[in-house]
């Protein structure tokens, strides 16, 4: 569910006109519904209320501090994959002992930062990473709490770019080698083994792959116990999908029922890492129609948002529903909706039956709350969009639109290049 609904042919976010927000803050514009964000987090977290657990929001899905603060206020934690995400989470009010750090390429500086602030757990992805972490902990005079991310070789039946649990993926340690990794970790002086981790992919729309992975990991937990290695935390990752088009993912309570059936007799604390399922349908990207044109082959709707603002359609050929903000027109036609970026891959819809718009109309790209702004760039030297949070009838600017001046912040022209235009330094 979400709180983007039509009222008398006009799209609203909760009690606020989307067109009014676009007029006030300009476009492209990301708009988020607080009611949707809070409801989704509570529904997901409550689905596991019968079992010890910690819900760590996947920060990579949406890292705006205001969004993170909502989940911190709800008692949630953070699943992070960089030092920057740790910093954002802390600034947003997350307790460090509710932060879990995953990712295959943690730098020395990032490991030191995480050790110094005292995060809950490092999800280790290679032997070299384990050795480096042990050494960084020694140098800092502390101990590092770890789990190993196990690759169970499960097909999550999702887009290959967001599959992470197959042998051919870069993530995790092969299950066949995992017991040796735990044995080795047990010998390291500055390492505390506290968990086991598994994450098989994103936008998964059925419970089967989760259950299959969990069964393999649970069997491995039993093997570790026989080795005398005590596991406290079972991190089952995230990946539960949402409806973009015709997908029918299980609701959180159905997903939780399937998971809890497998772990109900285990003395473990679950770590859950939902991302898209919490924020995906809680945000939209609003764009303005600049022009329309037709060729002998195509109709085009040209808008002021581009692939630099929302890259999912270009990167994954992902479907995003597109709605008219004011639905007065009933005329439909088949068109491509494209942006101003100088790439043929800059599109939001191809050969889609859409409402025929007029120049200046606002369109809403739905389900843009996850992997939207976080993947935005300044390609073509375009300032990134503003972000607004709606709470009932109140609106809050949670990120201002970038300016041209901010685009070149941090850049410098060397003195030897500062000659008069049209002249060059002799060789």
Image: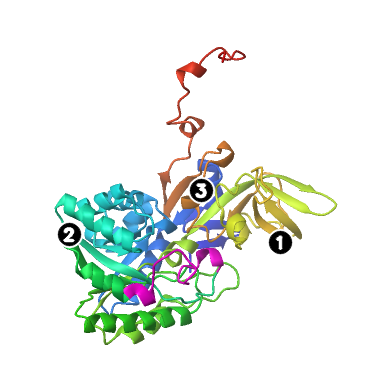
Q: Is mark 1 on a helix, strand or loop?
A: strand
Say what secondary structure mark 3 lies in.
loop
What's the CA distance linking mark 3 and mark 1? 24 Å
Nearer to me, 92 or 263:
263
Report the side of 86 relative to 327 (left or right): left
Q: Which residue is drawn at 35% across and 55% down?
A: 68
User: What span is colored magenta in the figure?
Assistant: 159-178
Percent coordinates x, y for residue 166 in the rendering = 48, 72
* 53 relative to 129, above or below: below
Q: Mark 3 points at which residue?
A: 376
Q: Rate crowding at label 3 as few (under 14), some (14 to 19) or many (20 or more) other CA atoms within 10 Å.
A: some
Q: Is residue 340 left or right of residue 232?
A: right
Judge depth for marks 3 and 2 and give the one in front.
2
Q: Do the residues bearing badges 3 and 1 touch, measured as CB atoms within 8 Å?
A: no
Mark 2 is surrounded, within 10 Å at the Cα level, by few (under 14), some (14 to 19) or many (20 or more) other residues, namely some
Q: Is residue 16 above or below residue 243?
A: above
Please tell me the numbered disc located at residue 143.
Answer: 2
User: Looking at the image, which residue is at 44% across and 69% down?
Assistant: 239
Residue at the far right: name it. 296
């Amino acid at each position: 569910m979400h709180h983007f609904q039509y009222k008398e042919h006009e799209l609203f976010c909760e009690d606020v006109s989307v067109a009014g927000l676009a007029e006030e803050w300009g476009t492209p514009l990301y708009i988020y519904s607080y009611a949707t964000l809070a409801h989704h987090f509570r529904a997901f977290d409550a689905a596991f209320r019968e079992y010890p657990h910690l819900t760590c929001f996947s920060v990579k899905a949406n890292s705006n501090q205001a969004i993170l603060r909502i989940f911190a206020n709800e008692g949630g934690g953070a699943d992070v994959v960089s030092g920057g995400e740790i910093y954002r989470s802390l600034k947003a009010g997350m307790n460090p002992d509710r932060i879990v750090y995953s990712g295959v390429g943690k730098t020395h500086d990032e490991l030191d930062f995480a050790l110094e602030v005292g995060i809950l757990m490092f999800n280790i992805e290679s032997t070299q990473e384990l050795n480096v972490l042990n050494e960084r902990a020694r140098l800092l005079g502390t101990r590092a709490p770890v789990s190993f991310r196990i690759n169970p070789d499960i097909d999550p039946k999702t887009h290959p770019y967001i599959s992470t649990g197959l042998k051919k993926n870069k993530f995790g340690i092969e299950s066949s080698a995992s017991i040796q990794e735990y044995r080795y970790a047990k010998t390291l002086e500055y390492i505390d083994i506290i968990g086991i981790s598994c994450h098989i992919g994103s936008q998964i729309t059925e419970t089967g792959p989760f259950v299959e992975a969990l069964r393999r990991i649970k069997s491995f937990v039993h093997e570790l116990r026989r080795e005398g290695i005590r596991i406290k935390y079972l991190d089952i990752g995230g990946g539960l999908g949402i409806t973009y088009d015709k997908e029918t993912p299980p609701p959180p309570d159905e997903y939780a029922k399937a998971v809890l059936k497998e772990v109900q007799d285990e003395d473990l604390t679950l770590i859950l890492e939902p991302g898209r399922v919490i924020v995906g349908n809680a945000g939209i990207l609003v764009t303005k129609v600049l022009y329309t044109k037709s060729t002998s082959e195509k109709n085009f709707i040209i808008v002021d948002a581009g692939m630099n603002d929302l890259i999912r359609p270009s990167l994954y050929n992902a479907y995003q529903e597109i709605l008219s903000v004011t639905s007065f027109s009933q005329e439909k036609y088949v068109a491509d909706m494209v942006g101003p970026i100088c790439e043929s891959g800059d599109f939001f819809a191809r050969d889609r039956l859409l409402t025929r718009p007029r120049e200046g109309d606002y369109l809403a790209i739905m389900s843009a709350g996850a992997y939207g702004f976080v993947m935005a760039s300044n390609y073509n030297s375009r300032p990134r969009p503003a972000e607004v949070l709606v709470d009932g009838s109140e609106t809050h600017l949670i990120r201002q639109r970038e300016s041209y001046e901010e685009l070149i912040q941090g850049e410098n022209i060397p003195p030897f290049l500062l000659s008069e235009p049209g002249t060059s330094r002799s060789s």
